[in-house]
Amino acid sequence: MKRLETVFAALLIAMSMTAQGIAFEPDGTTLEQASAKAKAEKKLIFLDAYTKWCGPCKMMAREVFPQEKVGAAMNPKFVSVQIDMESAYGAPLAKKLQVTAYPTFIIFNADAQEIGRFLGGSQADEFLKNVEEKSQDNTSAQLEQRWKQGDRDPQFLQEYLATLSAAYKTQQANDVAEAILKGQEETFAADSTLRAIFFRNITNPFASAFVYTVKQPELLKALAGNRPVEAKIQSVLGNYTRQLLIESDGSVKLDQEKFDAFNRLLGELNIANAAHYRLSTLITLTEKQKDYAAYMGYVKEYLATPGLDASDMQLAQWTKPFAAPDADKQQKEEMKKILRQRVDDIQNGTRRAQSSVGNMRLSRPTDELLRMLIDALDGKMPQQPKK
């Protein structure tokens, strides 16, 4: 009887094992550890690059990964690992892998060399189809090898750029785009293909095509319009500030050499609101470092700098560190003073309250939001405005 029970129990275990979804490695498993296991088991590596706030990431974890057919297809072939790209380990890895959208799924060989990737939530069948396709596609790796060996044939560069763009590898795509535009800084605007490459792929403010365009934007503006060109300039400069922070092992510091070079570039380009990029970087840095005294100092410097103007929503965002019950009382009072001044400016007509952010219309004017924040900082229940 005991023997029968043992056999029955073993069968139940076997059944539960075959009925499982993807057998992800334990939380905290690194890509390096996954690589070691993949080598030992002669498997590929599947990485689910996610964040805790990502809705499609949660959907995949809840509805797709646990399915039996997904596990049956994945487990024999892959060592699977999930990494939070905003964790102490994940943040620098996200930069290294150029992961900027979530969820991103990456297939590696056992040596942790990327084979392919795809993005976004999907149903199980589409997910498995993408996994199969990207597991067999070595085109990107072959093209990368040609690039590293110095191949700069124009047709090859276009093909490689298309592959990188499809994989959202923005940094490498920028490098290839720079190679394509090299020597054509003064003329690329007249070529619709090259113009599209500039707008879609140039992300480095030090790129010669970008520097030329900022200094002499007339031709590009005439062909593409003022707003797209100005938006591109602001986007490149704003996004680059994220690269000025070094996040590692749970700590954050400023890459001083890059920061200084960037500020020199802003001066060379004669950017009117150069102080915006410098102070925004320092505000983000000190918030991540939880150095709220320095943080408040940079917020006040921003507001006092001629030519700079923080929106109502930006003020609301800057208030977040002082919402905690244990926040420094003096700093909290300083923030309340800033918010009250903005509300007074709106009430006396010096400023107008925001009614929208980008294309999104707000449910109520921002002066009402600012009043609610002041109440919250005072420890009061925010008063809902009358309809």
Image (spheres, rainbow, N blue to C red):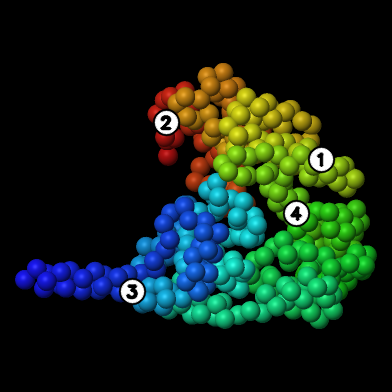
Q: Does residue 188 appear to the left or right of 44 in the view shown?
A: right
| Residue 39 position within the rendered picture, expressed as x and y whole percent measured from the top left | 53, 69
| Picture disc at residue 23 | none
Residue drawn at x 60%, y 34% as measured from the top left: 289
Which is closer to the viewer, label 4 or label 2?
A: 4
Relative height, residue 308 to residue 300 (above, below): below
Relative height, residue 365 to residue 32 (above, below): above
The quadrant holding residue 319 is top right
Q: Which residue is mark 1?
A: 260
Q: Which residue is mark 3?
A: 68
Total labels: the figure holds 4
The residue tagged with tag 4: helix, strand or loop? helix
Which is closer to the viewer, label 4 or label 1?
A: 1
Crowding around mark 3 (Cα neighbors within 10 Å: few <14, some 14 to 19, many 20+) is: some
Which is closer to the viewer, label 3 or label 1?
A: 3
Q: Which residue is mark 2?
A: 383
The residue tagged with tag 2: helix, strand or loop? loop
Relative height, residue 303 to residue 133 (above, below): above
The residue tagged with tag 3: helix, strand or loop? helix
Determine the residue located farthest toward the left in the rendered image. Answer: 1
